Image (cartoon, rainbow, N blue to C red):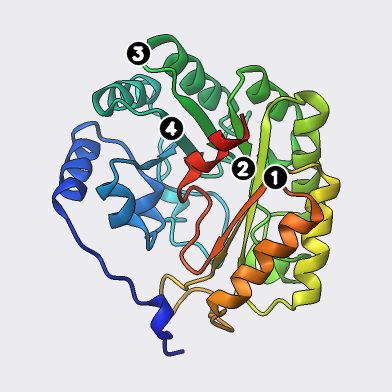
């Protein structure tokens, strides 16, 4: 499908982006910006931010929308130095908001939860700034005790994405489960009421407005605080095909609907992704 005018980005000012990317390479870290081919990469780099992708850059799931590598033969053990590297990186940039996302690691007994905990604890212990930490985690195969383990480490924001409506899960998220993801989000407020909960989904995959309305209602029932809604953009011709490009006016309508349902805030737009301008969570405290 031919992209409409509102999906054409005007990228300016590459100097800061080059510096950030160079620093990421120096520390041998992965970012979701690169691995998932995020359209906001240059904008975020230019603002001096990046979203880390931890536990490697190979995912054990076969989601058809995602650009992250899925070659299980290339999976490596977690880098035990990764928590220290991320903390040092955050200090170098004087970050006040850190986003850590992960590949799904169904090959690990705990799904990688202990590694996420070590990152949170290391950053809290060694970073000179009192920065916020947001974690965007997998479903850990339904092993809910891993969720409580991460919440015990006290991230400021706990994010788990629904990605799409239940009807499309088999095509878009094979290996995931809609109700399982909803339960994870419900557990956040039940276990740690002061932790900000967050979720997001894509549009343009063939969902209907009615299905989106139900999805929002389900997320409100799970007591989710923050919501992100963005346009799905196929990473390649081999990925799930875009069914529709959603007009910015419709994104505005979705945001208004989310706020009317009781979400504390909603970022909705064609280029919005889970961690795009994530620091808006700080407005809640």
Side (left or right) of 170 relative to 74: right
Counting residues from the N terminus, which is met first, the one under dot 3 or under dot 2?
A: 3
Q: Residue at x 74, y 66 (%)?
A: 165
Q: Residue at x 79, y 48 (%)?
A: 182
Label 2 near label 3: C-beta < 8 Å? no
Q: Which residue is mark 4?
A: 98
Distance (Cα) linking label 4 and label 2: 18 Å
Q: Residues within 10 Å of mark 1 (few under 14, many from 20)?
A: some
Counting residues from the N terminus, which is met first, the one under dot 1 or under dot 2?
A: 2
Per the rendering, the mark at residue 102 is none
Q: Residues within 10 Å of mark 2 (few under 14, many from 20)?
A: many
Label 2 near label 1: C-beta < 8 Å? no
Distance (Cα) linking label 1 and label 2: 23 Å
Task: Point out the frontmost of discs 1 and 4.
Answer: 1
Q: Which residue is mark 1?
A: 264
Say whether residue 118 is visible: yes
Say whether residue 102 is visible: no
Q: Which residue is mark 3?
A: 128
- Please state, as top left, top right, bottom left or bottom right, where the C terminus lies in the image: top right
Residue 53, by quadrant, is top left
Q: Secondary structure at mark 2?
A: loop
Residue 238 at x, y = what percent?
A: 45, 76
Side (left or right) of 209 relative to 240: right
Q: Secondary structure at mark 3?
A: loop
Distance (Cα) linking label 3 and label 2: 29 Å
Q: Which residue is mark 2?
A: 138
Q: Is residue 210 above or below residue 83?
A: below
């Amino acid at each position: 499908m031919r992209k409409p005018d509102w999906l054409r980005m005007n990228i300016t000012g590459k100097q800061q982006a080059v510096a950030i990317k160079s620093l990421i390479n120096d520390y041998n870290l992965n970012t979701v910006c690169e691995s998932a081919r995020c359209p906001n990469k240059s904008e975020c780099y230019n603002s001096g931010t990046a979203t880390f992708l931890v536990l490697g850059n190979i995912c054990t799931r076969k989601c058809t929308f995602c650009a992250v590598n899925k070659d299980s033969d290339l999976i490596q053990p977690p880098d035990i130095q990764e928590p220290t590297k991320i903390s040092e990186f955050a200090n170098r940039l004087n970050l006040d908001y850190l986003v850590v996302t992960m590949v799904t690691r169904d090959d690990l007994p705990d799904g990688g939860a202990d590694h996420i905990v070590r990152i949170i604890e290391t950053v809290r212990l060694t970073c000179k700034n009192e920065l916020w930490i947001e974690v965007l985690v997998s479903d850990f195969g339904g092993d809910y005790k891993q969720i409580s383990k991460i919440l015990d480490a006290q991230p400021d924001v706990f994010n788990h994405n629904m990605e799409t409506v239940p009807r499309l899960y088999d095509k878009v998220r094979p290996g995931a489960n809609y109700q399982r993801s909803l339960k994870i989000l419900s557990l956040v407020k039940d276990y740690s009421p002061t932790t900000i909960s967050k979720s997001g989904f894509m549009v343009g995959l063939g969902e209907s407005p009615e299905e989106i309305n139900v999805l929002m209602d389900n997320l409100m029932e799970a007591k989710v605080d923050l919501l992100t809604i963005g346009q799905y953009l196929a990473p390649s011709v081999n990925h799930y095909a875009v069914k529709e490009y959603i007009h910015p006016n419709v994104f505005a309508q979705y945001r208004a609907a989310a706020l009317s349902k009781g979400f504390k805030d909603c970022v909705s737009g064609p280029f919005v992704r889970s961690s795009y301008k994530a620091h808006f969570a700080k407005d809640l405290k």
